[in-house]
Amino acid sequence: MINDLATDQRVSRVAELLIKEGMEVTCIGRRLRQSPELPGFSFKTRRYRMLFTKGPFFYACFNMRLLLTLLFVRKPSLFIANDLDTLPASFTASRIRKVKLIYDSHELFTQVPELIGRKRVQRIWKWIENRYVPRLEHAVTVSFPIAEIYRRLYGTRFSVVRNVPVKRVIESNDWLKSEYKGKQLIIYQGALNLGRGLELMIEAMQYVDDAVFIVAGAGNIDGELRAMVEEKNLEEKVYFKGRVLPEKLFPMTISCDLGISLEEDRGLNYRYALPNKLFDYIQCRVPVLCSALPEMARIVRTYGVGIATEERDPKKLAGIIRYMLEERSNGAWRDVLDQAAGELCWENESQVYLDLLNKCGILS
């Protein structure tokens, strides 16, 4: 996985599932200058320090190091390639060493907003995808529409394992509210990247009183968002927490009254996304305000855990936020969130991964 492993909950959940089935697991990522120390995982980790941190030389060097590692480690039972940027090395090593490979595509990689409009770079990744994905025997992804797109493009069948969290028992926890004088709290958790609707949310906060917007995450538009908050004099309404490790993010989220996921329709990857945060909000019993993109809207409307909206006008969006905060104060969504949290959990979803491991012949 080409990240520093610190906050990748999907990788951690799968690793812990494999350990529970009696396997020894090593997760490989990279270490950046600002990477935090890793928590006490139950699996081994290895993080490369890279001379290049982005661009073609970075991806080439990372895959070369990964390939060498996979070729010379004590022969494993299974390789898992997380996302397209680790697939070349993982696929090559699996063929040379005759080791089973699962490709876990966390997103529709060639349709991420960072590649939309960069046609030359996008063509390179599509070439890589076209070279390897049709040859895969075992693959998994995060939503059914993305699985169907892969099947139509390459004839490869993908299982679907959504990014749902481990089931939690929720106890009353309002510690964060005291920090903000008892105001209602709205949270966004995740990467601060293009197309996440964060600029829209900051605009909307101009029209929302007696509430605070908590931004828990980091990313490549972090500086722009902070400058926007300063420009609009919203320092008392919008607070940036930076990157938060999962064990600290959970108690932060359960203190909140509303979780947002306002992604824009920027390419197929966002259109069919089912982000971690959507399920994390539900597991924390926090109602959801999300974009009316198909997969997110289907979850929110099926379980009745919030509102899916097409609204992109800041004043009108603020009206929806005020309504949801008032309803939250009156106890709305409590029962449906409990029901949804009981169903949308890793204890249920992990069975799909176990079935995939059985098909690979990994489990006895």
Image (cartoon, grey):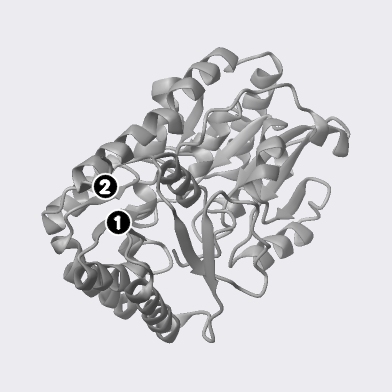
On the question of residue 116 being in view, the answer is no
Between residues 156 and 232, which one lies in front from this camera angle?
Answer: 156
Vertical order, 118 against 106 (above or below): below
Residue 228 x, y percent position in the rendering: 70, 61
Between residues 307 and 315, which one lies in front from this camera angle?
Answer: 307
Residue plotted at (55% across, 13% down): 335
Question: The C terminus is located in which quarter?
Answer: top left
For label 1, the residue is 77
Residue plotted at (66% across, 43% down): 247
Residue 221 x, y percent position in the rendering: 60, 65
Q: Are marks 2 and 1 in contact (CB under 8 Å)?
A: yes
Question: The N terminus is located in which quarter?
Answer: bottom left
For label 2, the residue is 362
Q: Is residue 273 left or right of residue 170?
A: left
Quadrant of the rendered image containing residue 78:
bottom left
Vertical order, 38 against 263 (above or below): below
Mark 1: few, some, or many residues within 10 Å (few <14, many ≥20)? some
Residue plotted at (41% across, 25% down): 301
